[in-house]
Amino acid sequence: MGVAFKDLIISKEIDLDYLKNKIIILDAYNILYQFLTIIRGIDGTPLMDSKGNITSHLVGLFSRTTNLMQRNIKLVFVFDGKPPKLKQKENEKRNALKLEAEKKYLEAKKREDKEEMKKYASRTSRLSKDMVEESKELISLLGLPIVQAPSEGEAQAAYMVKKNKGFAVGSQDFDSLIHGSTRLVRNLSISGRRKKGKSIAYETIKPELIDLSENLNNLGIDQNQLIALAMIIGTDYNPGGIKGIGPKNALKLVKQHKSDFDSLFKEIKWNSYFDFPWTEVYYLIKKIPTTDKYDLKWNDIENESLYKLLVDKYDFSEQRVKNTLEKLKKETSKKQQKSLGDF
């Protein structure tokens, strides 16, 4: 879901070339859910192989990852660990909504209403343990490092960027900012265009870079106030936030109360909306578990094993896989020649 910071945050458009040779730490679950939601047939059915296994996540992962690799962007994938208790409650609600969407999808299917089928099918996306393991196998065969977060992947990614282990977090959500990531890059893992609202028209989108320090200065608040601001708007740990208070009014309130969060949350009547104290969410965000136990090592691509996985096991087009790997090989060769030329 993520924090609805869009109306408050300033960003700058960048080209992918700007990220050349930079390490981008990706929130793997965020990306995989996008692929499961977006890569579907006209009736909303996810892509499948001949055995009925869903492959939308693998198709998106292979295509987008190799595209970024060809541009010499160094990728790291961070996977979620155990969700906090407050997140588990939200996950239960989300699962209930998915079950409701599945019912409506089946009703639309009976009516053969493809538009409604696609609408509700995209709301039923589930990332299974098997899908996670398949994704990890593909990432490893592409020679890219994987980091297992003890808890939230986005918090771990933010922690790594704070420690200068990467240039920016790559995610569509703004959550890494409340976890202190110094930079965030959005629009890395979706196509270069998207639908304009509910219309049939499309708009071009570009990657955008968000600088935390620049935004805090622009908003006139500090990192702790940013967390309080997010809580009023709504986080994954207190979904929906405080009803009737939009992002701009929330910012005004945060600035009025400065660091006196007790009076802030008393004024907005936090206890009328949530059956747990505001401190529980605040300190969860501040102290969420992270780890230094990871190894950022980029290895050679295992071509033969990739063919077996994608072509033999999941029915990918042999020519498509071959063409993609050849492009990557050429790019790697160019890079090696350039490095030798530097001497």
Image (tube, helix red, strand yellow):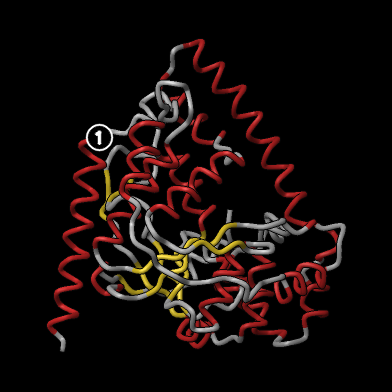
Furthest-front residue in view?
304
x%, y% of residue 244? 67, 59
Q: Nearer the viewer, residue 318 or 56?
A: 318
How packed mark 1 is, by other alpha carbons closer than 10 Å (few <14, some 14-19, many 20 or more), is few
In this view, the residue farthest toward the top is: 110
Q: Residue at x 68, y 64 (%)?
A: 150
Horizontal placement of 219 versus 98: left or right?
A: left
Q: Is residue 91 above or below residue 2?
A: above
Front residue (pair 290, 332): 332
Q: Position of residue 12 (x, y in %)?
A: 33, 74
Q: Locate residue 53, reporting x and y percent.
A: 48, 28
Residue type at the position of mark 1: Glu
Quarter of image, res 60: top left
Q: Percent position (x, y) of residue 85?
A: 79, 56
Query: Which quadrant of the structure image shows residue 267?
Result: bottom right
Residue at (23, 48) in percent of width and height: 324
Callout 1: SS: helix
Q: Is residue 96 left or right of residue 280?
A: left
Q: Viewed as shown, does residue 123 lie left or right of 211?
A: right
How many marks overall?
Answer: 1
Quarter of the figure that contains the C terminus = bottom left
Residue at image coords 47%, 70%: 169
Residue lying at 36% horizontally and 69% vertically, measured from the top left: 74
Query: Relative to the observer, which residue lies in front, 72 or 116?
Result: 72
- Residue linked to disc 1: 318
* 43 lies left or right of 162: left
